[in-house]
Image (tube, grey):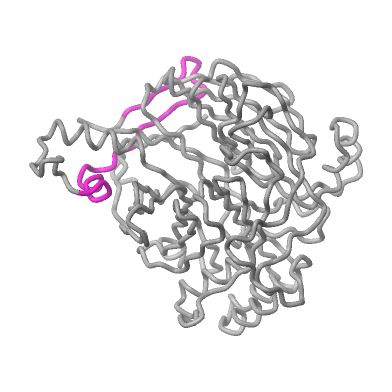
Amino acid sequence: MSTRQQFVAKNGRAQVSVEGQIPVSLQRLLFGNDDSDDGKQLDADRLAERYLACMKKVICAMSIGGRYLALAYESRFMLLEWSQAEGRGECQLVSLGNDAAMADETITALYCIDIYTPQPQRRGAGTVCVVAGYSSGHMRVFSAYGHLLTAHQFHPQPLIRIRLRMPLPDMSRQRTTAVESEEMNLTFQDGTMVSVDGRSLYLALRLCLSEAADDSAGPMFQYKKWAFDLHTPRVSDAASFGPAMRDPLAQLAKHEHTSSPHVAEATARFLVAPCHGEAAFGVFATSEDAAAAVSAVAVAGKMAARVTGAVLSMAKSYFRRSTTLSESGQSTPSRTDTGTRVPCVLAVRDSPRKVLSIALSPEPYALAALTDSLGRVMVVDLESCEVVDMLKGLRGSQCAWMESTESDKVQCVYVVVYAARRGVVEVYAVGAERQLQASVSVGQGWTLVQGPTQPLGGSLVVETAGSERRATQPVPATCVLLGDNGRIARISA
């Protein structure tokens, strides 16, 4: 049976195209042997049922544009390359790995990260890494070919979410810090968050990929640890959305529309969704800087000394421009360190409503889509900290963001909602007046996967002919659907 299938909205404004399917042979590699509990070989029907049940537990992430797809099940992960051949999609295995250190250690978070390289001809599998978070709290970074590049345990709690936060592509929009750095944010189950400095992580991974790192010492990078002033032992999700804008008009608007002036002066802001308590979600903010866990001088000296050519130029650019890196050595805290305490400055209390997940928009829009336990999706303006819209009738929903383009220019940004119980994909246009753009019936059994828009290192300032420019510009946001039968579908509007 052909895997090609297309679901189209009645008004024709959106469509979901099934472009291929993960072969059963690759599913077998990910899910393990085909034996039943009594050791007998499963027949075809029971095997299909087993794979269907396993696919529902798979964690998925994709690279920019969806060329690479990372899947994780229990302690194993797999990287697939997605290609179009003769009008149909094909999945090819790139790597398969299992690096669990303990018998009961499982993968709880996954991120497929693209690494910027100045040579376009070298971009491909060699510049893609898989970042896996584990139930033990470990973060492990693998090359596309399954080689372990670095491993760290920042906190001894399950790592539940991995995000890459990029500074605004429009450099004219100033913020409270002179230069805003890229960050990889790691959210742990007890609400602790670790922000890994993007500059030092970029250099560490470039060195590992080029085999220039010193194996005896291992790569080093700077990170900060945050702890939120919570009255609950667990969170559903948490996300960092960076420092407040420096624009006086924006600050005036925030003072007028928010209940706390602390948000306007904050150097770090977070959305946190606690599992228990009266608050559905809260805004946490601080104007105090967290202590860095690794000396910036040690990172710069140890790494920049080992890179040459274009990478050395980028390293100098990173560390010369950073105003957040301390020049004095900092002692590395123990992995049980609780982190810098961040107070709650705003809380939305609407019991029994609880926020279940947070989906951040692409950087220029400063929005977030929050799913909750009452079947709503709240759209939050991150600058004013206001709920600007609420979408109803979406129980069991998943959210992502998508941009439409025309002549290589972004025309519109959409909130994409997959209402799992109804088996419907709804696309909402975001703007001065929110409207339902289209509704597409696709059936049940799908997982919505958000694709990144920028590579690690993409905000690097490159100097050419006496002028400065950003290394890369963000690509339009995209998302795909992964079916529990292995089908892969793209959403377009």
Residue 10 shows in the view: yes
Residue drawn at x 62%, y 56% as measured from the top left: 194
Relative depth, front residue between 205 and 100 = 100
- Is 346 placed left or right of 74 in the picture? right
- Is 362 placed left or right of 383 in the picture? left
In this picture, which residue range is highlighted in magenta?
5-32
Relative depth, front residue between 492 and 301 = 301
Residue drawn at x 44%, y 37% as measured from the top left: 480
Compared with residue 37, is residue 174 higher up or lower down, i.e. above or below?
A: below
Q: Position of residue 454 (x, y in %)?
A: 58, 53
Residue 83 shows in the view: no
Q: Position of residue 165 (x, y in %)?
A: 63, 51
So how many labels did they put on this image?
0
Residue sitting farthest toward the bottom: 305
Compared with residue 416, is residue 284 higher up or lower down, i.e. above or below?
A: below
Query: Which part of the image, by quadrant, shows the N terminus?
Result: top left
Residue drawn at x 70%, y 44% as measured from the top left: 270
11 in magenta: yes
Q: Position of residue 213 (x, y in %)?
A: 50, 79
14 in magenta: yes
Q: Position of residue 386 (x, y in %)?
A: 76, 30
